[in-house]
Image: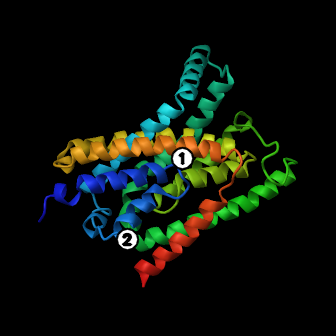
Amino acid sequence: MRSYAVVLTFFRAIVIGLFQGVTELFPVSSLGHSVLIPALVGWDDIVKQQSTESPYLAFLVALHVGTALALLVYFRRDWVKIVGGLLDSARQRRVTTPDARLGMLLIVATIPAGITGLVFEHELRTLFAKPTAAAIFLTINGAILLVGERLRRRVAAGAGYGGDGFVGGRSIDSLSYGEAVFIGVTQIGALFAGISRSGITMVGGLMRGLDHEDAARFAFLLATPIILAAGVYKVPDLMGHLGDGIRGQALAGAVVAAVAAYISTRFLVRFFETQTLTPFGIYCLGFGAFCIVRFAF
């Protein structure tokens, strides 16, 4: 049997890291693409590693840590204010500032997906991290984004925000804790390869009356602790025997993923000031349908 260091070359690590960094933030599912891209280019030896505890999954841990660090760097000013507000609120035993309240919203929204991920992440990956399943869920993701946009227009019009969704709209700090939990619950869908964390979370925010810009900001802030915690939780795998021979590739992939994630976040924050999820929904439907035909027949 070949060493996994031969299977996961530096070239492959960099390519997968690039796709991870982009697709983790774009609403098109990084997990789905981490299954589909290797399968499409013929890296079957990597594909076979995805449904079990393996060096490839340990490698993906490094990519997630890189992505989370990029998000922390991009939103560093927000996180400094949030953490400072939470510490001040803890001292005074009450929520003292809008930044502290945003921190509390993020905490309660993180709990549902965090608990579910700890309990079911391995089982769901074992069952569904396969090309055909990932293609089906990616197609479903496209439908979720398009239906979400349609429902968002109804929500916006009914609340008097304007049918285009770009005039008016609720602010993040107007969300109730129950609404934050609702948005957090949507993240659970991202445990299925092909369902985008940022996409489904944005749809949840749009359903509660946020505009695209604030829905994206809340989704990115909410994703940061989940991605980082998932990566740190699995770091022992990379430091253990599963990481033997691939730690250099993991570092290279993580650096590429971090740079790609930072650039993607910068682009998307500006993109959603004026644009919608529709282009990504169309892409997911088209690419997902193509992959279904490619792998299922």
Percent x, y of residue 66: 38, 41
Residue shown at the point (47%, 51%) measured from the top left: 22
Instruction: State the image coordinates of residue 81 (x, y, percent, origin top left).
Output: 58, 23
- Quarter containing the C terminus: bottom left
- Please rate how many residues cluster around mark 1, counting C-alpha atoms within 10 Å: few if below 14, some from 14 to 19, many from 20: some
Are the residues at dot 2 and dot 1 in contact (C-beta closer than 8 Å)? no
Compared across the picture, whether 55 is left or right of 111 comes to left
Q: Residues within 10 Å of mark 2 (few under 14, many from 20)?
A: some
Where residue 170 sits in the image (x, y, percent)? Answer: 77, 40
**Element type at marker 2?**
helix
Residues under labels 2 and 1: Cα distance?
33 Å
| Viewer-proximal residue among 132 and 77 | 77
- The tag on residue 30 is none
Quadrant in which the N terminus is drawn: bottom left
Q: Amino acid at mark 1?
A: Pro
Instruction: Tell me the SS state at disc 1.
Output: helix
Q: Which residue is mark 1?
A: 112
Count of numbered circles on the image = 2
Q: Amino acid at mark 2?
A: Leu
Q: Residue furthest top?
A: 92
Left or right: 257 as drawn, with respect to 199: left
7 to 95, vertically: above or below: below
Between marks 2 and 1 in the image, the one whose residue lies nearer the viewer: 2
Q: Earlier in the sequence, mark 2 or mark 1?
A: 2
Tell me the residue at 85%/50% (across/down).
Answer: 162
Q: Is residue 186 visible?
A: no
Q: Identify the disc placed on residue 40.
A: 2
Tell me which residue sits at (23%, 57%) in the image: 8
What residue occupies the far bottom of the structure in this picture? 297
